[in-house]
């Protein structure tokens, strides 16, 4: 059967990284994604991270399943060509500063007047309105201002930022969901196109758990607790005898009881304070000490086997080499192999989820800049001479 988003055309005019990743997700499930890049600069993602044989590795995965075209949108002819492209498209994803598209004559009012079925997803750090709307911003700022960095790290250490694009990734997932919701409204409910205003900082607020409600109702500000949870214990990382690390979680009461019995301290299970997660969190030093001492006396294999037998929650701390070697990930093809025309077989994360009736797939890796100019613009009626003229002027 066809992929679930077959027949949907997405124009990805965004950069770094939330918008492009949202488009990648849609492309994985069958959408026809057309990546629009500046003719000279390209998407900055092409220059991020390591390359092999001149091929940018991040781009190879991020731009999979995308056709690539070049357009200088600040040139009137480039803007006009984008309008023609969008006249038959379903979705535009962009992350220019508010007002930029309007200045180029590409504002949503213009685009929706020409194509009322178009969904315009606008992804910026702080949204299209408000005092900070016109500030330049990246996911790092969202990680800082959402409250995430303030609660991340050791209690006596500085606020800690993630070493990867966490806010961008969360916003990409959110944007993809928002776009599919808008498509459902349009196609299944008899609706029209619309504008999606996604501020990268706002999905971060939603994934930080109970912070907002606790502050609103109790006036409490969550502080840094390292690997510990403010809601339950034991919850931490522990080092094994052979120098490996494991993570233990006891969010459920039954799991907490199993862990403490496993590590040889059934007496604490009978304590009144042990009956609630909050009570256990108040005694985290004691519980961590019991678990850490037991784990430190054993190698990784026996620790994992004992937890598994006790039906208690534990996981080894993996680096990416461990992920590649793990038999469960191998069985599920979580890291899959795709052929690249230059690099040959390359391995990258597989699709986010599996669908039994309408599976998606990775059809190709990221392509060179402008690789599909002739095919995409030719379908709009431009001749080879037209394209040569635009190329000479730097429009494409």
Image (cartoon, grey):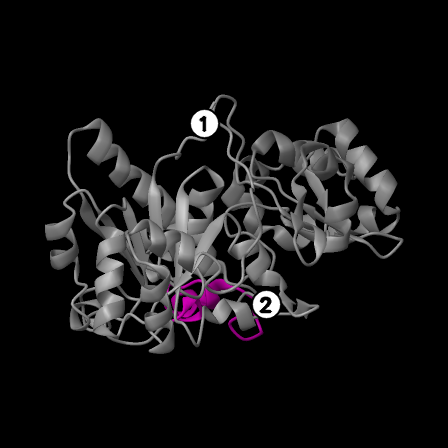
Residue 149 at what x, y percent from top left? Answer: 47, 67
Can you identify the residue that label 1 sits on?
2
- Please indicate whether residue 287 sits to the left or right of residue 306 in the image: left
Residue 107 at what x, y percent from top left? Answer: 17, 62
* Towards the viewer: 130 or 104: 104
Residue 208 visible in the displayed image: no
Q: Is residue 141 magenta?
A: yes
| Mark carried by residue 154 | 2
Q: Nearer the viewer, mark 1 or mark 2?
A: 1
Q: Are marks 1 and 2 in contact (CB under 8 Å)?
A: no
Q: Residue at x 47, y 71 (%)?
A: 44
Q: Establish if 246 lies above or below 357.
A: below
* Quadrant of the rendered image containing residue 3: top left
- SS class, disc 1: loop
Residue 330 visible in the displayed image: yes
Residue 93 at what x, y percent from top left? Answer: 32, 55
Q: Establish if 105 lies above or below 9.
A: below
């Amino acid at each position: 059967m066809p992929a679930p988003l077959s027949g949907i055309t997405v124009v990805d005019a965004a950069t770094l990284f939330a918008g492009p990743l949202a488009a990648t997700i849609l492309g994985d499930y069958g959408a026809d994604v057309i990546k629009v890049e500046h003719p000279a600069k390209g998407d900055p993602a092409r220059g991020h991270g390591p390359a092999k044989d001149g091929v940018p590795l991040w781009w190879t995965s991020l731009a999979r399943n995308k056709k690539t075209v070049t357009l200088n949108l600040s040139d009137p002819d480039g803007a006009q060509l984008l309008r023609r492209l969008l006249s038959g498209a379903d979705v535009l994803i962009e992350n220019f500063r508010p007002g930029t598209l309007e200045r180029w004559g590409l504002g949503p009012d213009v685009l929706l007047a020409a194509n009322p079925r178009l969904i315009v997803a606008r992804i910026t750090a702080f949204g299209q309105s408000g005092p900070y709307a016109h500030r330049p911003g990246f996911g790092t700022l969202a990680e800082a201002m959402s409250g995430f960095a303030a609660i991340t790290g050791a209690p006596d250490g500085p606020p800690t930022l993630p070493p990867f694009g966490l806010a961008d990734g969360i916003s990409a997932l959110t944007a993809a969901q928002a776009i599919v919701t808008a498509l459902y409204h349009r196609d299944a409910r008899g609706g029209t196109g619309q504008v999606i205003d996604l501020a990268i900082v706002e999905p971060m607020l939603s994934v930080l758990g109970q912070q907002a409600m606790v502050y609103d109702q109790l006036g409490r500000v969550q502080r840094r607790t390292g690997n510990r949870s403010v809601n339950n214990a034991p919850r931490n990382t522990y080092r094994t005898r052979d120098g490996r690390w494991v993570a233990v979680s006891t969010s459920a009461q039954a799991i907490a009881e199993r862990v403490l019995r496993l590590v040889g301290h059934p007496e604490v299970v009978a304590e009144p304070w042990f009956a609630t997660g909050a009570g256990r969190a108040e005694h985290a030093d004691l519980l961590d000490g019991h678990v850490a001492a037991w784990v430190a006396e054993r190698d990784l294999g026996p620790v994992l086997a004992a937890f598994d037998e006790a039906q208690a929650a534990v996981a080894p701390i993996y680096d990416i080499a461990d992920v590649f070697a793990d038999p469960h990930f191998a069985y599920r093809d979580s890291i899959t192999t795709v052929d690249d025309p230059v690099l040959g077989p390359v391995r990258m994360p597989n699709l986010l989820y599996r669908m039994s009736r309408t599976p998606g797939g990775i059809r190709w890796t990221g392509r060179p800049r402008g690789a599909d100019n002739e095919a995409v613009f030719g379908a709009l009626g431009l001749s080879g001479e037209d394209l040569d003229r635009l190329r000479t002027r730097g429009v494409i």
